[in-house]
């Protein structure tokens, strides 16, 4: 019986150490990620002729959005600037994030860069990316 108690004590010590290390790791990850740039969420929709990328950028001004597009990637960068200065007051809660948001995605099809369009309304960025016309293929009979 005493062996079991010693084994149980050792197991409990190990589990306690693991739980403490897990809490330390969570704290470290939270500190690290709180300083990382935001990663805006997006939808990518494909039909036969075009791709549509829809990204929510609430609180961003049109002039603070930058788009870099290649034939197979879209990069969106936006600055979330704090709207006001708080002096002599303490935050009870501060959940809104400020800083730079960045997202790069690889597109599932090549696009016509020169025909791309984008609009920004009510905090939603919509990018229309016409696909490159698919070249006709020729099937060759193998002898």
Image (cartoon, rainbow, N blue to C red):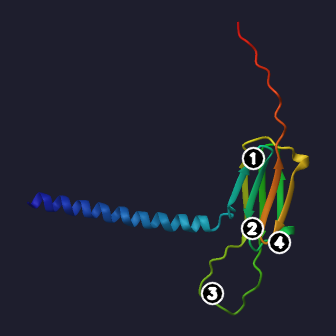
Q: Which mark is residue 57?
A: 2
Distance, label 3 to label 1, CA atoms, is 47 Å
Mark 2 surroundings within 10 Å by alpha-carbon count, few (fewer than 14), some (14 through 19), many (20 or more): many
Is residue 127 shown above or below 64?
above
Numbered label attached to residue 2: none
**Label 3 with label 1: CB-CB less than 8 Å:** no
* Mark 3 closeness class: few <14, some 14–19, many ≥20 residues within 10 Å: few
Which residue is situated farthest in the top direction here?
Answer: 143
Q: Secondary structure at mark 1?
A: loop
Residue 119 location (% of width, % of height): 85, 63
Horizontal arrangement in the rendering, residue 6 relative to residue 98 (left or right):
left
Give yes or no for contact between labels 4 and 1 (Cβ–Cβ under 8 Å): no
Q: Viewer-proximal residue, 80 or 14?
A: 80
Give the Cα separation between the discs numbered 4 and 2. Answer: 9 Å
Gap in angstroms between the C-alphas marked 3 and 2: 24 Å
Residue 128 location (% of width, % of height): 82, 53
Residue 14 higher or lower than 113, as above or below:
below
N-terminal-most mark, 3 or 4: 4
Q: Which residue has dot 1 on it?
A: 47
Please give the name of the residue rendered at 39% of the width and 67% of the height, measured from the top-left corner: 20
Nearer the observer, 25 or 50: 50
Label 3 residue SS? loop
Q: Which residue is mark 4?
A: 61
Identify the residue at horizontal 72%, vertical 88% (top origin).
86
Q: Earlier in the sequence, mark 4 or mark 1?
A: 1
**2 lies left or right of 127:** left
Residue 98's x, y, as percent? Answer: 71, 73
Q: Secondary structure at mark 4?
A: loop
Q: Nearer the viewer, residue 143 or 26?
A: 143
């Amino acid at each position: 019986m005493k062996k079991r108690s010693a084994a149980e004590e050792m197991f409990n010590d190990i589990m306690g150490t693991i739980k403490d290390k897990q809490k330390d790791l969570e704290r470290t990850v939270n500190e690290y990620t709180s300083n990382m740039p935001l990663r805006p969420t997006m939808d990518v929709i494909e039909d036969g002729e075009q791709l549509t990328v829809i990204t929510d950028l609430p609180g961003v001004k049109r002039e603070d959005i930058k788009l870099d597009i290649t034939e197979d990637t879209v990069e969106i960068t936006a600055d979330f600037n704090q709207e006001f200065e708080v002096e002599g007051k303490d935050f009870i809660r501060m959940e809104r994030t400020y800083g730079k948001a960045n997202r790069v995605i690889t597109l599932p099809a090549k696009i016509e860069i020169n025909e791309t369009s984008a609009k920004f309304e009510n905090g939603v960025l919509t990018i229309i990316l016409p696909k490159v016309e698919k070249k006709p293929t020729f099937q060759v009979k193998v002898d």
